[in-house]
Amino acid sequence: MKIRLTGKAVPAINPGVVNALRSIDNPLRILFVCLANLCRSPMAEAMAKHLHGRDLAPDSAGVSPAPGPMLPEAVRVIKKITGFDFSGHVPRFVLDLPVQDFDYIIALDSSVFLRLNDMPQIPKDRLYGWDIVDPCGLGEDAYERTAAQIEEDLERFLLNREMEKSAPRRR
């Protein structure tokens, strides 16, 4: 089965995959981190909420949060794809959140990953890096492509975590 939320079909993961990754009463906590917390990480938070509802507890932050409101193109694309209104989103610094409480911390590009890796407070065993293109200044179509990339990477990430969990351990 494939889902088509962003105009591009991607394989839909079995709902049991997310359920297997979390405990029965606790949703899987994922922190998405980008540079400014103005577009990519809030978009990832919204996509995760939209795709997996109560099974995930996503949040977002930045390594260098920008002052001011979220970028309007990001707000429009999130609303169009997920129905969520993120116009009131306030950018936050990653270390203002209880980073140790997250199951996974996902850096949305390599420079963010390196900055997070240098922060002693970040649990390195929960830190993962993606390569999501920053759509800032590239027009609304770029935001839609970014949303599609986030959707695809999220599904792949969750599927890979389940495969790791179920793989036989080597001695």
Image: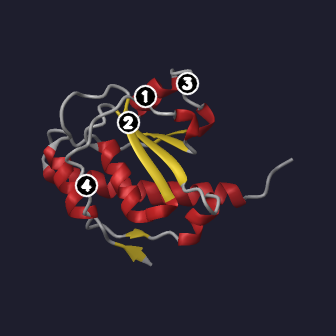
> Closer to the camera, 142 or 87?
87
Instruction: Give percent across and percent down for residue 37.
Output: 31, 36
Query: Could you tell me which residue is drawn at 14 percent across and 39 percent down?
Result: 137
Task: For label 3, count other residues whose C-alpha is less than 10 Å away and answer few (under 14), some (14-19) or many (20+).
Answer: few
Sequence-first disc among 1 and 3 = 1
**Which residue corresponds to mark 2?**
61
How far apart marks 1 and 4 lie (CA) works out to: 29 Å
**Which residue corresponds to mark 4?**
145
What's the residue type where badge 2 is placed?
A: Ala
> Closer to the camera, 101 or 36?
101
Q: Badges 4 and 3: C-beta atoms under 8 Å apart?
A: no
- Toward the right, the furthest residue is 171
Q: Badges 2 and 4: C-beta atoms under 8 Å apart?
A: no
Mark seen at residue 96: 1
Q: Which quarter of the figure has residue 52?
A: bottom left
What's the residue type where badge 3 is placed?
A: Gln
Q: Is residue 108 visible?
A: no
Q: Badges 2 and 1: C-beta atoms under 8 Å apart?
A: yes
Q: Which quarter of the figure has residue 85?
A: bottom left
**Which residue corresponds to mark 3?**
121
How far apart marks 4 and 3 lie (CA) works out to: 32 Å
What's the residue type where badge 4 is placed?
A: Arg
Q: Which quarter of the figure has residue 101?
A: top right
